[in-house]
Amino acid sequence: MKDFLLTADFDLKIENGDFVIGESNQQHQQCLLLAEKGAYKQFPNVGVGLATFINDENPDDLLREVRLEFTKDGMKVNRLAYENGKIKVDADYGK
């Protein structure tokens, strides 16, 4: 999916005085993972809230929430795993 790109600080990326547009799948995934429920005023039920799972010893709840949120956002989740303390995601928006 193409969209406006963000910087590492989540500001709009601007080059030569214009917004930068590019492949944004990973960016959308990152925003969904970090966003707490209620973070988006227009869509208060959107977001995984990764920080809430920080002390959770069983990653199944986290993976279930990630799959649910990515699917609600229109992504097809091909593979989702928690390996060596990292979330591995293979998901993409349908064509």
Image (tube, rainbow, N blue to C red):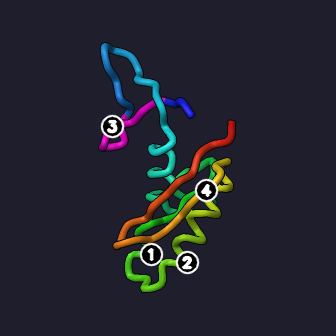
The image shows residue 9, relative to residue 35, as above or below, that is above
Q: Label 4 amino acid? A: Asn
Q: Residue furthest top?
A: 16
Q: Residue at x 44, y 51 (%)?
A: 30
Q: Residue at x 49, y 68 (%)?
A: 81
In this picture, which residue range is highlighted in magenta?
Answer: 4-11
Q: Nearer the viewer, mark 2 or mark 4?
A: 4
Image quadrant in which you'd find residue 46: bottom right
Residue 79 position within the rendered picture, expressed as x and y whole percent measured from the top left? 56, 60
Residue under pointer 4 = 78
Quadrant of the image for the C terminus? top right
Q: CA distance from mark 4 to mark 1?
A: 22 Å
Q: CA distance from mark 3 to mark 4?
A: 27 Å
Residue under pointer 1 = 53
Residue under pointer 3 = 7
Cβ–Cβ below 8 Å for labels 2 and 4?
no
Q: Label 2 amino acid? A: Asp
Image quadrant in which you'd find residue 8: top left
Give me the disc on residue 36: none
**Between disc 3 and disc 2, whose residue precedes?**
3
**Between disc 1 and disc 3, whose residue precedes?**
3
- CA neighbours of label 3 inside 10 A, class few (<14), some (14 to 19), many (20+): few
Give me the disc on residue 61: 2
Say if the magenta span includes residue 7.
yes
Say if the magenta span includes residue 69.
no
